[in-house]
Amino acid sequence: MTIDAHCITVPDDIDETQFIAHPVVPADLTLGDLSGTPDYDLALGMISAMRDATEDCDSTIAMVTYPWLSEEDGTTPVSIRFILKV
């Protein structure tokens, strides 16, 4: 099993969110850079879920599950789980 890191910045403007470590998205790409592509809505949902999960978190760790597409074929639906330390 491979475990991939998912790290992003959390600026006030969600479109300025920068991907720092992601198994598919190149480092330093922002959500706004994906605007107008099919990946924008998918990434927006993922980032929103991550932000929402930490907003009301009573502990220092939150876990987010988000529907995504398989890394192997890019079409098979899978569930991605994120562990966030806030």
Image: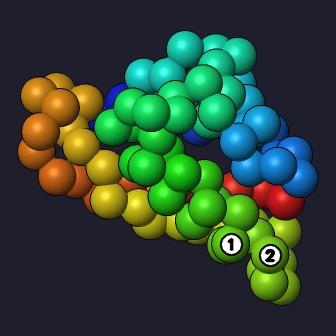
> Dot 1: within a 10 Å radius of its alpha carbon, few (fewer than 14), some, or many (20 or more) residues?
few
Please tell me whether residue 28 is drawn above or below residue 34 in the rendered image. above
The structure residue drawn at horizontal position 70% and vertical position 16%, both measured from the top left corner, is: 28
Cβ atoms under marks 1 and 2 closer than 8 Å: yes
State the image quarter where residue 19 is shown.
Answer: top right
Residue 11 location (% of width, % of height): 87, 46
Q: CA distance from mark 1 to mark 2?
A: 5 Å
> Along the line of sight, which residue is nearer the eye, 64 or 29?
29
Three-letter residue code for mark 2: Glu
| Residue 32: image tag | none
The structure residue drawn at horizontal position 73% and vertical position 30%, both measured from the top left corner, is: 18
Residue found farthest to the front: 36
The structure residue drawn at horizontal position 25% and vertical position 30%, both measured from the top left corner, is: 71
Q: Tell me the residue that label 1 is attached to.
A: 52
Three-letter residue code for mark 1: Asp
Residue 7 location (% of width, % of height): 68, 36
Q: Is residue 5 visible?
A: no
> Dot 2: within a 10 Å radius of its alpha carbon, few (fewer than 14), some, or many (20 or more) residues?
few
> Along the line of sight, which residue is nearer the eye, 69 or 44?
44
| Residue 55: image tag | 2
Q: From the viewer's perspective, is 11 left or right of 6?
A: right
> Along the line of sight, which residue is nearer the eye, 71 or 38?
38
For the rendered model, the colour scheme is rainbow
